[in-house]
Amino acid sequence: MEKILVGLKRVVDYNVRIRVKSDGSGVETDGVKMSINPFDEIALEEALRIRERGEAAEVIVVSIGSTEAQQQLRTGLAMGADRAILVSSAQPLDPLSCARVFRALIDRENPELVILGKQAIDGDNNQTGQMLASLWGRPQGTFASKIEFNGPVATITREIDTGLEVHEIDLPAVITADLRLNEPRYVKLPDIMKAKKKPLDEIALDDLGIELAPALTNVSFEPPAERSKGVMVEDVAGLVAALKDKGLL
């Protein structure tokens, strides 16, 4: 195949403790470490391995957001992507709008494969990949824990509650990456320096010629209720009595 398109979303780093803004309008991001969504990083690693095996010629990373997302795209380039595209948007987009943006980029780039993370750790929607496959009219392989190719056919292994499922899908296709697909590589300083010379194109959202009508509106945000303090018991009899008091026995 010639091209693989990979989505990279800018999210609050998974090691950071999330704090809701005082006005409930969203999550606090000022002064907070931001990173590539972990599932997207796995998706990029898989695309790079496919290219390194000689099964693809080019890996293109894409992000949708403000100019700050260039940081995550540069990290993707440092990992080994060939070029990057930033679709500039002042406001965060819902999953369907993101799928429409990727669909427009597919018309421009004509990739044989699109790999996305199965979900983003901020919204946890798990929708964009499936919606993109539907808009594109192409097969999808979700929650992939293993990907193999035999010419124009991809074999996807995915984990389900009862074990493993194996599917064969024709390319072009959309694949979403699960946690166990691989372990992303460590970015070294020389690679970071080389990434500065790789092309990063910026496209205004309006220039894609698509009409976005968000289907979802976030009204407010609030943190989860704090857990009540546990009760200490002295012995088994005390534990049984406490459970009976709560109606659990």
Image (cartoon, rainbow, N blue to C red):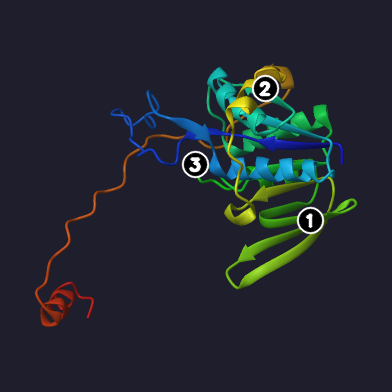
Q: How many marks?
A: 3
Residue appearing at x 60%, y 56% in the figure: 180
Residue 137 quadrant:
top right
> Badge 3 is on which residue?
123
Question: Circle 2 sits in a helix, a strand or a loop, which is it?
Answer: helix
Q: Which is closer to the viewer, label 2 or label 3?
A: 2
Judged left or right of residue 186, residue 81 is: right
Mark 1 and mark 3 residues within 8 Å of each other at the beta carbon: no
Judged left or right of residue 225, residue 117 is: right
Q: Nearer the viewer, residue 212 or 7?
A: 7
**Label 2 CA crowd tier, 10 Å (few <14, some 14–19, many 20+):** few
**Label 3 CA crowd tier, 10 Å (few <14, some 14–19, many 20+):** few
Residue 69: x and y in percent read 56, 24
Question: Circle 3 sits in a helix, a strand or a loop, which is it?
Answer: loop
> Badge 1 is on which residue?
148
Q: Nearer the viewer, residue 124 or 70?
A: 70
| Mark 3 residue type | Gly
Residue appearing at x 85%, y 48% in the figure: 171
What distance separates the C-alpha of mark 2 from that of mark 3? Answer: 32 Å
Residue 151: x and y in percent read 90, 52
Judged left or right of residue 76, residue 217 is: left
What distance separates the C-alpha of mark 1 from that of mark 3? Answer: 29 Å
Q: Quadrant of the C terminus?
A: bottom left
Q: Earlier in the sequence, mark 2 or mark 1?
A: 1
> Badge 2 is on which residue?
194
- Does 43 sit above or below residue 214? below
Question: Circle 1 sits in a helix, a strand or a loop, which is it?
Answer: strand
Q: Which is closer to the viewer, label 2 or label 1?
A: 2
Q: Earlier in the sequence, mark 1 or mark 3?
A: 3
